[in-house]
Amino acid sequence: MKTYLQRIGRSLMLPVAVLPAAAILMGIGYGIDPSGWGEGSPAAAFLIKAGGSIIEHIPILFAVGIALGMAKERDGSAALSGLVAFLVITTLLSSGTVAMLQGIEAEAVDPAFEKIENAFVGILSGIVASLMYNRFSHVKLPDALAFFSGKRLVPIMTAFFMLLVSVVFFFLWPFIYSGLVSFGESIAKLGAAGAGLYGFFNRLLIPTGLHHALNSVFWFDVAGINDIGKFWSGDGVKGVTGMYQAGFFPVMMFGLPAAALAMYHTAKTKKKKQTASLMLAAGFAAFFTGVTEPLEFAFMFLAPMLYLVHAVLTGLSLAIAAAFNWTAGFGFSAGLIDFVLSSQLPLANQPYMLLVQGLVFAVIYYFVFRFFITKFNLKTPGRTDDSDEQEQHDTISSDSKYADMAERIFAGLGGDANVTDLDYCATRLRIEVKDMDAVDQSKIKATGVPGINVVGPKSIQVIIGPQVQFVAEEVKKLRRK
């Protein structure tokens, strides 16, 4: 079950990767006309509406992206089926259709059906479409119906299956929706404390990849919170909307880079150069883009105590930002690029105070990390024993960096004889193997990757960083040989 949820989280990264485009368009638009929101400038209106077209259709993006990502083969018919599934259920369970089915006025329909076009239903539609693809994409029908065989059969079966799902949801959706709303409201009612709890569990779930499920409740329109959508559209409360995003900026832009500096300063003298290259690259990515996994995975499993401290500090950061009503938002992650763009938005409230908070958190992170590392002799990068860490990494040629890295990672995984499936998300290679004992982790680590995460008896993740796509493509080439 956990592995399946991780696959959903991985698939969500495809549609989520579109959000930076919305952030750029809307950020520039609001920057051109910060007071009129497009009313005083056709150019601003054009850009704001263009970005809003993405934000407003996140559920459809989820349906298509998950269908594609969860299918055994990334085929267009799977994506089309995701769209078909979403259109069937949202049309059949729209307020107008439900009113006709129940023989009542539209105003009397349960309010839950007004919110049927949401991220939760988008995710469900994508899952159903992927199941239909995996089951029917290679089915051969009799000659008379041969035209509808295989991949052409997938959207047809998806439409029929979604009819059944729609019947079930006709009765269940009001209860599901009220449950999701109650969960979101129970956290939202806690105010700053609720934002802190969310931040804590967000970081705590990173190793499993299940943080995407938690994020969808607070960031998208699953339970009515829709923190990202409302923040970027301006349809929220100034100083409140964005509270589940703002506190990440001090941590990702300042806290974690300061932690990287602490780990460099506490590394063994003979390993400082090697540690510096890893920490500099990971800290740079965290500050500018908000991509923190390369840095977090560098100490997550070497020093679990330190990662728990990091989760607590993240929760504290979100609680402080929410308590003072400092808000900013992001389309991808809480880095400098998103901060600059979101600070121009109408609902951004004293965003530059987050930079002040960030400087304070940089000091806290540095001294807290340094204290825990030295006090408990934690084996952070550069402090592991020679027997636990391969001192010399093979040199990767600049001309074929990704190909060379992929070849050595693939060999460490056991090659074609052991690798059964391979995919990737924002920063990780996600691999299924036949025998975990055949995986040579030391050989993989020798390539200089930030970390390795064994998530199941046959599931392993290799943390690469933002350039993971290029390594994954090279590994897939090796599998075809």
Image (cartoon, grey):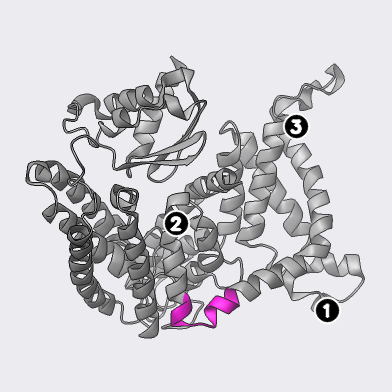
Q: What secondary structure is marked by label 1? A: helix
For the question of whether residue 38 can be seen, the reply is: no
Percent of width and height locating residue 165: 79, 52
Secondary structure that dominates the magenta span: helix
- Farthest-out residue, top: 481
- Magenta region: 184-194
Q: Which residue, given by chain and number where applicable, does mark 1 sit on? A: 108
Q: Amino acid at mark 2?
A: Leu
Q: What secondary structure is marked by label 3? A: helix
- Farthest-out residue, bottom: 324
* Residue pictured at 17% horizontal, 33% vertical: 391
Total numbered circles:
3
- Alpha carbon distance from label 1 to label 2: 36 Å
Residue 179 is drawn in which quadrant? bottom right
239 to 344, vertically: above or below: below
| 404 vs 73, nearest the viewer | 404
Q: Which residue, given by chain and number where applicable, does mark 2 sit on? A: 19
Q: Which residue, given by chain and number where applicable, does mark 3 sit on? A: 153
Q: Amino acid at mark 1?
A: Ala
Percent of width and height locating residue 124: 67, 52
322 to 293, vertically: above or below: below
Percent of width and height locating residue 269: 7, 46
Whether the magenta-drawn stretch holds residue 187 is answered as yes
Q: Amino acid at mark 3?
A: Leu
- Farthest-out residue, left: 269
Q: What secondary structure is marked by label 2? A: helix
- Alpha carbon distance from label 1 to label 3: 38 Å
Is 325 positioned to the left or the right of 360 in the image?
right
- Alpha carbon distance from label 3 to label 2: 32 Å
115 to 146, vertically: above or below: below
**Mark found first going from the N terminus, 3 or 2:** 2
